[in-house]
Amino acid sequence: MNDAKVQIGVNKLGHHVQSSQNRLLIKGGKVVNDDGIQEADVYVEGGVIKQVGTGLLTPGGVRVIDAAGMLIMPGGIDPHTHMQMPFMGTHSADDFYTGTRAALAGGTTMIIDFVACPRGDSLMDWYNKYRAWADEKVCCDYGLHVIVPQWGDKTANEMATLVKEKGINSFKCFMAYRNVFLLEDDEMLNVFQACRKLGAVAQVHAENGKIIERKAEQLVADGIRGPEGHSYSRPEAMEIEATTRALAIADEANCPLYVVHVMSAEAGEAISKARRRGQVCYGEPIAAGLACDNSSYQHTCWRHAAGHVLSPPLRDPSTKERLWRMLATGELTCTGTDHCVFKADQKALGKDDFRRIPNGVNGVEDRMSVLWEKGVETGILDPCQFVAATSTNAAKVFNLYPQKGRIAVGSDADIVVWNAKETRTISAKTHHQNVDFNIFEGMVCHGIAEFVISGGRLVVDERQLKVTQGAGRFVPMPAFPPYVYNRLEKREAAKSAGTVAVARDAYDGPVIDLKAEQERQKAVAKEQPGAAGGGGGPEAAAENVFHRPPTRGGGRHMQESSFSLSGAQFDDTKPARSGIRTHQPPGGASSGSLW
Ligand code: URQ
Ligand code: ZN
Ligand code: ZN
């Protein structure tokens, strides 16, 4: 791991006004936003962008950054990281200091991490814990999503407080990891409904955890204990099924849904289809899924294979291309990393049983380069789309825009000056992530973060990392992101317009007396030859199973299933009957034999 030049304990609030180092003029580059590219200089002061244009008038004592031939882009926003997360008996190895330092080294200037509250605990306690961990360590700005591992009044109240008072606007549900995070469908519906009411975005880890658990047990029983078992136990169908189910439940709740780490192309297509139906939903592929594949699970080096264990797992090599196409067309919206690293000795907790390998891979430092190389250098994305996928779209979904995700007057000075002409080779030997392995090892990438500005501070200066521990801020994310909720509210109104009671005269005819009807059926059964007291025949069984009364002719109601596994029908023993009357059939009494 590379050592950075670290300053510790610099006054958190004073960093915008500390020195003329914070008056920066970025000159000679091209400004890239999600909607256009222009040749312009950018002047930064007091942590915000003050001017964008040519021939700018700036005060003296300004540090000039030469961006000739380079791109000036909004710093990356990684909406999916897990720093120092307690998980599977250990903690992810990057904490909020090492993790955000690595993020900045790669051109990412904001992370959104997850408050990982285990089942049974208080969301608020864990939020406070995460704030305390992060506030003193973060080198760049950060926000938080909150994992909801259970449902109940307390959870509902805590969600409301988190949204109204604590800067939270997204909650994540897990469909996997039973007894820790997994929510049942009805619990998830409750969380989604609460999100809708509060103006939050629901997130989901979509995998059918219960079926996976069964498959994993079977694999271990069959003697498959290596990391390949992780991949075999989590087939794509389990991700597709859970994604489809989560989308349906979110639609039912009229809640916006953000599907994290979309690893399966078909799961991505389910999201895309839902979007085409008008549902407000988003999919997030991650750097790992866009650049790696499941061949790594077959590697004969255990560490290498275990180093790629994450959930959902990497898929077959054709998946990457399909995920890329969906990102390019906007069917998938944001890119994250799910950065959650574990060192060799931590991964080794599962050396004899893949179920105990802590799940997670690196990416927070690598995402920008990997996406540029695999997306822009290949002609799949243009630089504007790159900005959208790495920064602007996340800012819009999580209501940070245009404070974040844009180079414009008034926006935060979170900027990366990107040298797309040069390359670097990714390696665990040189990266800043606190882990002895890199899933992108050896990848040669165009795109180097030559200068990075975080909250107006120059934190990467000609590739030299100069971070300040604790200098980042918690950025509250307000409820009801307009990018998400404007359309959702209109759609909801249109949907409910079609759900109205039909005006009609009240029905005032007779209503069947079910009890009397049952008595009558029993009496009829007794009359049957061989009914043996009417107690144990098929009719009695039918009474317990079928809730509709017999048809007017006394026969089987054709809308009831009448199959039994033996092939018998419940009324097989009944002779054909006719002439059984109801007192007053619907539509009025009839004198014909039908009644
Ligand atoms: O599922 C996640 O998001 C975390 C808890 C672990 N990382 C992973 O394997 N995806
Ligand atoms: Zn997850
Ligand atoms: Zn995650």
Image (cartoon, grey):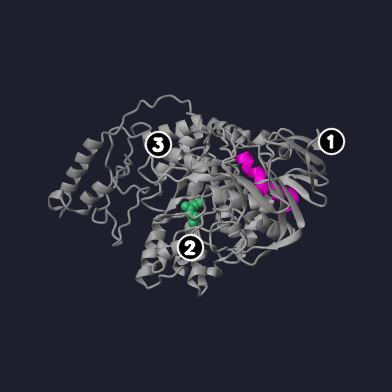
Residue 452 on the magenta segment:
no
| Mark closer to the observer (2, 3) | 3
In front here: 269 or 218?
A: 218
As drawn, the label of residue 235 is 2
Neighbourhood count class around disc 3 (C-alpha, 10 Å): few under 14, some 14–19, many 20 upward: some
Residue position for label 3: 155
The vertical placement of 465 against 135, above or below, is below
The residue that disc 1 covers is: 56
Label 3 to label 1: alpha-carbon separation: 52 Å
| 531 or 504: nearer the viewer | 504
- Report the magenta residues as a range: 381-397
Q: Amino acid at mark 1?
A: Leu
Q: Which dot, 1 or 2, sits closer to the camera?
A: 1
Asked which secondary structure carries label 2, the reply is loop
Q: Nearer the viewer, residue 197 or 37?
A: 37
> What is the quadrant of the C terminus in the image?
top left
